[in-house]
Structure formats: C-alpha cells, structure tokens
Image (tube, grey):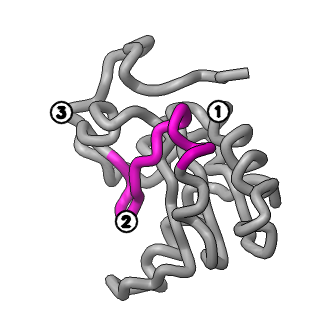
Amino acid sequence: MDGEIDPEELSALLDERDGSADESLRIVDIRDQRAFDRGHLPDSECIPFPELTSRVAELEDSDRIVTVCPHGVASQQAAQLIGSYEGTQEARVESLRGGIEAWEQEIGDLPASDEPAAGDPDEGPESPF
C-alpha cells in the first residue's frame, strides 16, 4: 500500500481524465452491491471486500488503484491486500482518506437521496480484521 489519497486529489485525477476510458486508474469500492448502487464515486467499480481475494486478478496491469469504503478504514486493509498481490505489485495502491463520507463532505458528487443511514449494515465493513 502506498498510503492514502485525499478526496480533492482523487477528484482532480478524475477531472484530468476528462471522460476518457483510462484503465490505468481503477477505483475499487469494497462495499456490497446494494450500497454501491445507492451511490458511488464516478468511474468506480464494485468489488465487495469478501470477494476481493478471489477477484484481485481483475486489477492486474493497473498503474494506480484507489480503494474506497464508507469511512476509509476497511479500504486501507483492502489496499494492503491488493498491493501484496503479485499482479499488482508495480501499481500505486492507495486508500481514499475518510472514505465515502469524506468524499460527500468535500466533493459532494454522490446522490443524497439514497444515502444509507448511519450504521446501515449494507454500507459495507467498518473493519473486517
């Protein structure tokens, strides 16, 4: 794991891409599919934490991977797991500092009407270890 990335920095990276399908940056949301469907970061993909070990090969050949969770705790562990995989060891792997919560506060690009309530079990793991 290469540390954390702030929401503003990630937002700037997404703006730089300007809609291009740049596969070198992968944003991996580790919440479950229902939470992901209620609102997620632009261009992110859902790989729920329990599926991460069996799906990590999908991230091979990425240059940069950012993991996302509700509060930025479990995504740090996910980033460590991804970074330890042989196929992603050359990638820059980071966790979104503060998670979805920080993104909504600082960037605000997620739909507000479908936000999960605090403590909603569908919003994903707080810390799986």
**Is 48 contained in the magenta span?**
yes
Residue 47 has which mark? none
Residue 43 has which mark? 2
Task: Determine the CA span between mark 2 and mark 1.
Answer: 20 Å
Identify the residue position indicated by label 1 in the image: 74
Q: Label 1: state its secondary structure.
A: helix
Q: Tag count in the figure?
A: 3
Task: Determine the CA span between mark 3 and mark 2.
Answer: 20 Å
Report the amino acid beneath label 1. Ala
Residue 113 has which mark? 3
Report the amino acid beneath label 3. Ser
Q: Earlier in the sequence, mark 2 or mark 1?
A: 2
* Residue drawn at point x = 62 percent, y = 50 percent: 96
The label nearer to you, 3 versus 2, is 2
Range covered by the magenta-colored residues: 40-54
Residue 96 shown left or right of residue 1 in the figure: left
Crowd around label 1: few <14 · some 14–19 · many ≥20 (10 Å):
many
Crowd around label 3: few <14 · some 14–19 · many ≥20 (10 Å):
few
The label nearer to you, 3 versus 1, is 1
Q: Earlier in the sequence, mark 3 or mark 1?
A: 1
